[in-house]
Image (cartoon, helix red, strand yellow):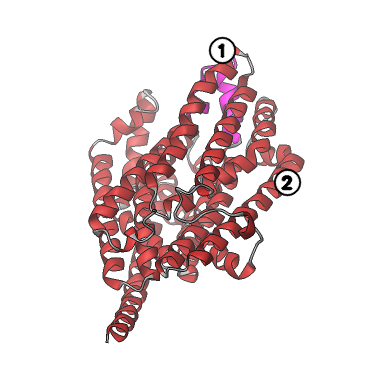
């Protein structure tokens, strides 16, 4: 008999460790998943550099595909946890079924759009006459596996939200290990080049998708994916999409922000400024993954107990997430400030880039230590079903603050490249302050209302 209520009974600190550790591992493995293709392709004889650039141009498209999986999965998972907390398992299963069907629809639409407009999009994203052939070769095969990417990433969230983070971690590890094995076979042994890399990726994602769906239809899952629940119920799906808009914006705008940074740095600096930005954005991505893993570990606990009307456990879950996130972000900030050259050296050994990149890193990451507060508060808003605030915060930091600051700040400083890098810390300070104020006000009010309701029931 599956214990569907352990999220509401087991000690919160023990639960957090049990759920967060596999989530962090899964995020780091997922980073490896995304890097393996580029590592192998970059070592292709004679054409490695051009092939790597061509596949790199595909990255914005890949990020958008992943963002749609987050749109449904990260929006639907908290809703399912809340229903489970209310002991409404029927609504939880019908919500998951609606999300599954909607992921199928999105996959088919994305496949059609990318097949028709893919080459034109790749040219917009920076492909040249020398690299477009490699980009198209990779993309035309990758888009055939869009449905597998959507199901593997999107539906895996519904395993995590039940507290089965070890199973969701295995879902990622299975695909990553298979991709590592198949890449050299298809790229070098079968001499398929970038086409082989794309084929290895979609086969790996297909296996992960089968694993994920297989678990959700099995008796091992606390709530099951059933045929009778696959009809989309708008009353259940729309609240999920409202919650999912925030993570969708957070992921989909990454490519836009990179384009804005690179264009401005190329204008005010030169190739070395853009090269340094590539290093900085990669480190930023790496630093975010453990924070996202911690948030995913806390989400089932927070959402379940919010649905169960247990404010004390909700507060405990948030405090643990805040402490661990802030500790991690402060430790990483300290390392970046003390030895930035060591981080640049991981990517390139040219003295000029090491010197410039170290200088830029201290500016770009100047206040990154406080970013753990932003993640803890913003993700808790999502976990308790506050779609409006989580959406506002996602738009506020990246679209309202960061992108305009990239273009505004250079007008106020003599060193304009420095001003471009400064856009990140300035946006972070304003965003963290705003998020904290909104969170203190809303979360405190919500907890008081939950406590009053709990006392009324007990009396």
Q: Is residue 249 magenta?
A: no
**Residue at the (39%, 49%) spot, across then down:** 164
Instruction: Please rate how many residues cluster around mark 2, counting C-alpha atoms within 10 Å: few if below 14, some from 14 to 19, many from 20.
Output: few
Residue 45, numbered circle: 1
Q: Position of residue 365 (x, y in %)?
A: 33, 47
330 over 148 or under it: above or below: below
Q: Disc 2 to disc 1, how far (Cα)?
A: 33 Å
The crowd level at tag 1 (other Cα within 10 Å; few <14, some 14-19, many 20+) is few
Magenta span of residues: 36-57
Looking at marks 2 and 1 on the same chain, the residue that comes earlier in the sequence is marked by 1
Residue 431, x across and y down, in percent: 39, 62
- Marks counted in the figure total 2
Residue plotted at (57% across, 14% down): 188
Say which of marks 2 and 1 sits in front.
2
Q: Residue 455 location, x and y as percent? A: 28, 83
Q: Is residue 53 magenta?
A: yes
Give the quadrant of residue 259: top right
Quadrant in which residue 29 is drawn: top left
Q: Residue at x 67, y 41 (%)?
A: 124
Compared to residue 370, the image places residue 340 above or below, namely above
User: From the image, which quarter does the C terminus lie in?
Assistant: bottom left
- Relative image position of residue 125 (x, y in whole percent): 63, 40
SS for tag 1?
loop
Look at mark 2 in the image and give the residue it sits on.
Answer: 113
Please tell me which residue is depicted at 30% across the width and 32% down the height of the picture: 341
């Amino acid at each position: 008999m599956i214990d569907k209520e352990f999220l509401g009974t087991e000690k919160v600190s023990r639960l957090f460790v049990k759920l967060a550790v596999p989530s962090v591992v899964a995020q780091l493995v997922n980073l490896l998943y995304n890097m393996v293709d580029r590592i192998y392709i970059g070592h292709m004889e004679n054409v490695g550099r051009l092939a790597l650039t061509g596949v790199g141009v595909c990255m914005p498209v890949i990020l958008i595909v992943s963002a749609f999986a987050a749109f449904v999965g990260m929006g639907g998972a908290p809703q399912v946890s809340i229903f489970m907390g209310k002991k409404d398992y029927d609504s939880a299963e019908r919500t998951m079924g609606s999300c599954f069907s909607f992921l199928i629809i999105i996959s088919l639409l994305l496949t059609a759009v990318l097949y028709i407009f893919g080459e034109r999009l790749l040219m917009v994203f920076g492909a040249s006459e020398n690299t477009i052939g490699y980009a198209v070769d990779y993309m035309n095969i990758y888009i055939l596996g869009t449905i597998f990417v959507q199901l593997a990433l999107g539906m895996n969230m519904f395993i995590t939200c039940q507290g089965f983070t070890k199973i969701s971690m295995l879902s990622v590890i299975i695909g990553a290990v298979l991709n590592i094995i198949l890449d050299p076979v298809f790229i070098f042994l079968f001499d398929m080049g970038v086409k082989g890399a794309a084929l290895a990726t979609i086969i790996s994602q297909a296996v992960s998708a089968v694993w994920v769906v297989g678990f959700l239809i099995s008796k091992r899952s606390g709530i099951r994916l059933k045929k009778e629940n696959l009809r989309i119920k708008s009353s259940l799906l729309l609240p999920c999409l409202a919650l999912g808009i925030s993570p969708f914006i957070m992921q989909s705008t990454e490519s836009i922000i990179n384009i804005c940074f690179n264009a401005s740095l190329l204008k005010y600096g030169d190739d070395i400024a853009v090269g340094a930005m590539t290093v900085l954005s990669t480190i930023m991505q790496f630093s975010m993954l453990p924070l996202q893993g911690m948030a995913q570990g806390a989400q089932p606990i927070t959402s379940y107990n919010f649905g169960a009307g247990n404010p004390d456990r909700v507060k405990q879950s948030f405090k643990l997430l805040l402490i661990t996130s802030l500790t991690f972000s402060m430790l990483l900030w300290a390392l970046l400030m003390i030895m930035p050259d060591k981080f640049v050296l991981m990517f390139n050994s040219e003295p000029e880039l090491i010197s410039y990149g170290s200088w830029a890193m201290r500016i770009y990451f100047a206040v990154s230590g406080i970013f753990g507060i932003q993640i803890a508060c913003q993700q808790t808003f999502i976990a308790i079903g506050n779609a409006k605030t989580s959406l506002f915060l996602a738009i506020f930091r990246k679209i309202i603050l960061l992108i305009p600051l990239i273009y505004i700040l250079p007008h106020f400083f003599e060193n304009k490249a420095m001003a471009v890098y400064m856009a990140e810390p300035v946006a972070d300070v304003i965003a963290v302050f705003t998020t904290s104020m909104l969170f203190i006000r809303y979360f405190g009010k919500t907890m008081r209302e939950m406590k009053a309701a709990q006392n009324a029931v007990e009396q």
